[in-house]
Image: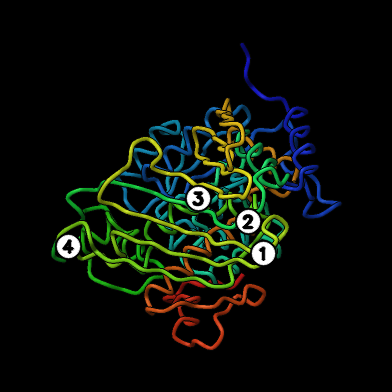
C-alpha cells in the first residue's frame, strides 16, 4: 500500500489543525512566491555530521523531491561518513559552514551541530537566504533564541525546530482533549527523562585534539579552552555548549506542555540537584536534577499550574523513560511517544487508551513549509519558548535561588547575577546580530 501523503492531504490536515487552536498555516509574506516551486527538487545541506545529523539525512532521503547536496563538519571523519550516507562523491564537503552558505544551489540547511552553535548557524543561514531546519534545543541561552527569531523575521525565512512530536497524530489528539476541558482543572504537569549512563563521565585530563579535528572552530562562539575529551564527547554536560538533558531532551516535553496549555513562559523557576549517581566528574551540570516552574492563569489552567521536571542519569525506569502527565480534577493523562492513557478520578469509568499510528514525517512537513512558504507549527518562536523553561531552571540552579521571569521583556528582574546568564558571552569573530 502506498503510504505517501499528497500535498492536498497535508494541507487539509493543517487546516483542520488550525480549527482546534494549535496551528496555523500563516504566510510570512502574502505576496512571497514559493521558491522553489511545488514540483521542484529541494537541495539540502547538513551542518553537523554526528549521529543526529546523519539520522536526519536518512529522514529527508525518505521524502520525494529532496536531496542532500552538501555536508559540513569540523571533524573530518564524521563529515566523510555523512557524505557517504548522503550519496557519496557527488555530495560536496565543507569545513567552514560560511563557505557552504555561499553555495547558491543550496535551498535549505539542516542544522545538527552542538547546542551552542544552533542559533548562530540559523542566523547566518537566514542572512544567506536559506530556509532552516534546526535541531532542538533552539539555543544555549534565552538571548540566542530571541536573536534567531529576529533573523527569521528580518530575512523572511522558514525556520522549523526538530520537535517532531508536533507532527504526530496522537499528540494532536491529546492536545485537543486537554484543551477541551475533559481533564477538568489542571493544576500540575509532571515531565521526566530517565537515563542510565553508568559508570558516568569521568575526569580525563586535557590533551591534544584528534587529527583532522578543528577544536578552535568547534568551540566557535564559546570561550577558548584547552582540548579535553570529555568536553568534546560529553559536551552537553558543560555550561558553554549545552544545558544537560533538562534542556536538550526535555524541550520535547516543554513544547507539548506549552502547546496543550496555551502558554509561552513561566513566571518563576527553581532548580536543584547534584552529582548523586557517579564518582567525581569533570562535567559541570548535575547528574540528578529536579525543577519547578510556576505558570500564570491561562486558557486551560484558569488558576495557573505547576510544571515539575525530573531528570536523572543513574537508572532508567521500565518503558516510560521519557514521559509527561497532566493532572486534572476529572482525569489525568499520561502521554509519551507510545500514545496516551486517560485515567478518570473519583471512581468514574476506568481507562481510555489511544496509541500512535503513523505520524507525519517531520522532515516532509518542513519541505512542505518551504515549498509553500508557510509558517511551521514547530516554528522558531515555538522552539524558543519550548527551550526557555530548561534555561530558567538551570539559571536558578547556578545562582542557588528561585528566580522570577518577565516573559514579555525576557529578563529576570531584581537579580543582576541571574539576569546576566540570559545572554552568552560571544567570542570574536562570531555574532548574534541578525
- Between disc 3 and disc 4, whose residue precedes? 3
Q: Which mark is residue 303?
A: 1
- Between disc 1 and disc 4, whose residue precedes? 4
Q: Residue at the spot x=60%, y=75% of the render?
A: 410
Tell me, yes or no, whether the two marked residues, 2 and 1, touch with CB atoms within 8 Å.
no
Q: Residue at the spot x=58%, y=67% of the render?
A: 266
Q: Quadrant of the N terminus?
A: top right
Closer to the observer: label 2 or label 1? Answer: 1
Disc 3 and disc 1: Cα gap in Å?
33 Å
Q: How is the image coloured?
A: rainbow
Give the vertical position of 98 relative to 142 (above or below): above
Q: Secondary structure at mark 3?
A: loop
Give the vertical position of 339 relative to 182 (above or below): above
Disc 2 and disc 4: Cα gap in Å?
40 Å
- Density class for disc 3 (Cα within 10 Å; few <14, some 14-19, many ≥20) is many
Q: Which mark is residue 431?
A: none
Q: Position of residue 198 (x, y in %)?
A: 20, 48
Q: Which residue is nearer to you in this view: 124 or 238?
A: 238
- Density class for disc 4 (Cα within 10 Å; few <14, some 14-19, many ≥20) is few
Closer to the observer: label 3 or label 1? Answer: 1
Q: Position of residue 61 (x, y in %)?
A: 52, 30
Disc 2 and disc 3: Cα gap in Å?
13 Å
- Between disc 2 and disc 4, whose residue precedes? 4
Q: Position of residue 274 (x, y in %)?
A: 27, 66
Residue designated by label 4: 208
Closer to the observer: label 2 or label 3? Answer: 2
- Density class for disc 2 (Cα within 10 Å; few <14, some 14-19, many ≥20) is many
Closer to the observer: label 3 or label 4? Answer: 3
Residue designated by label 2: 382
Amino acid at each position: 500500500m502506498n503510504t505517501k501523503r499528497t500535498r492536498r492531504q497535508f494541507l487539509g490536515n493543517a487546516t483542520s489543525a488550525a480549527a482546534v487552536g494549535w496551528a496555523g498555516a500563516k504566510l510570512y509574506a502574502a505576496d512571497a512566491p514559493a521558491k522553489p516551486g511545488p514540483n521542484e527538487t529541494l537541495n539540502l545541506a547538513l551542518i553537523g555530521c554526528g549521529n543526529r545529523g546523519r539520522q536526519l539525512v536518512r529522514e529527508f532521503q525518505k521524502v520525494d523531491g529532496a536531496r542532500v547536496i552538501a555536508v559540513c563538519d569540523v571533524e573530518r571523519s564524521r563529515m566523510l561518513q555523512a557524505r557517504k550516507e548522503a550519496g557519496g562523491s557527488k555530495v560536496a564537503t565543507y569545513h567552514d559552514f560560511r563557505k557552504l552558505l555561499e553555495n547558491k544551489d543550496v535551498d535549505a540547511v539542516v542544522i545538527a551541530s552542538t547546542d551552542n552553535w544552533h542559533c548562530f548557524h540559523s542566523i547566518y543561514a537566514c542572512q544567506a537566504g536559506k530556509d532552516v531546519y534546526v535541531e532542538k534545543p533552539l539555543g544555549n541561552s534565552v538571548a540566542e533564541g530571541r536573536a534567531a527569531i529576529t533573523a527569521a523575521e528580518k530575512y523572511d525565512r522558514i525556520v522549523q525546530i526538530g520537535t517532531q512530536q508536533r507532527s504526530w497524530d496522537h499528540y494532536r489528539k491529546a492536545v485537543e482533549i486537554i484543551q477541551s476541558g475533559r481533564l477538568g482543572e489542571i493544576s500540575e504537569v509532571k515531565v521526566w527523562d530517565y537515563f542510565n549512563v553508568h559508570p558516568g563521565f569521568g575526569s580525563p585530563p586535557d590533551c591534544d585534539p584528534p587529527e583532522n579535528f578543528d577544536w578552535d572552530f568547534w568551540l566557535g562562539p564559546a570561550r577558548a579552552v584547552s582540548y579535553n575529551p570529555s568536553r568534546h564527547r560529553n559536551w552537553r554536560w558543560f555550561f558553554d555548549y549545552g544545558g544537560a538533558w533538562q534542556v536538550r531532551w526535555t524541550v520535547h516535553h516543554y513544547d507539548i506542555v506549552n502547546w496543550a496549555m496555551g502558554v509561552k513562559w513561566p513566571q518563576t523557576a527553581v532548580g536543584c540537584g547534584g552529582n548523586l549517581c557517579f564518582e567525581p566528574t569533570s562535567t559541570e551540570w548535575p547528574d540528578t536534577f529536579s525543577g519547578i516552574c510556576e505558570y500564570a492563569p491561562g486558557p486551560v489552567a484558569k488558576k495557573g499550574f505547576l510544571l515539575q521536571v525530573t531528570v536523572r542519569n543513574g537508572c532508567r525506569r521500565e518503558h516510560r523513560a521519557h514521559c509527561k502527565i497532566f493532572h486534572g480534577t476529572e482525569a489525568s493523562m499520561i502521554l509519551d511517544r507510545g500514545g496516551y492513557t486517560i485515567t478518570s478520578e473519583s471512581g468514574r469509568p476506568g481507562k481510555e487508551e489511544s496509541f500512535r499510528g503513523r505520524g507525519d514525517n517531520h522532515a516532509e512537513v518542513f519541505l512542505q513549509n518551504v515549498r509553500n512558504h508557510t509558517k511551521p507549527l514547530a516554528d522558531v518562536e515555538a522552539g524558543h519558548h519550548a527551550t526557555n523553561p530548561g534555561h530558567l531552571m538551570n539559571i536558578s540552579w547556578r545562582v542557588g535561588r528561585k528566580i522570577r521571569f518577565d516573559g514579555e521583556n525576557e529578563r529576570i528582574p531584581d537579580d543582576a547575577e541571574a539576569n546576566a546568564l540570559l545572554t552568552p558571552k560571544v567570542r570574536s569573530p562570531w555574532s548574534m546580530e541578525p
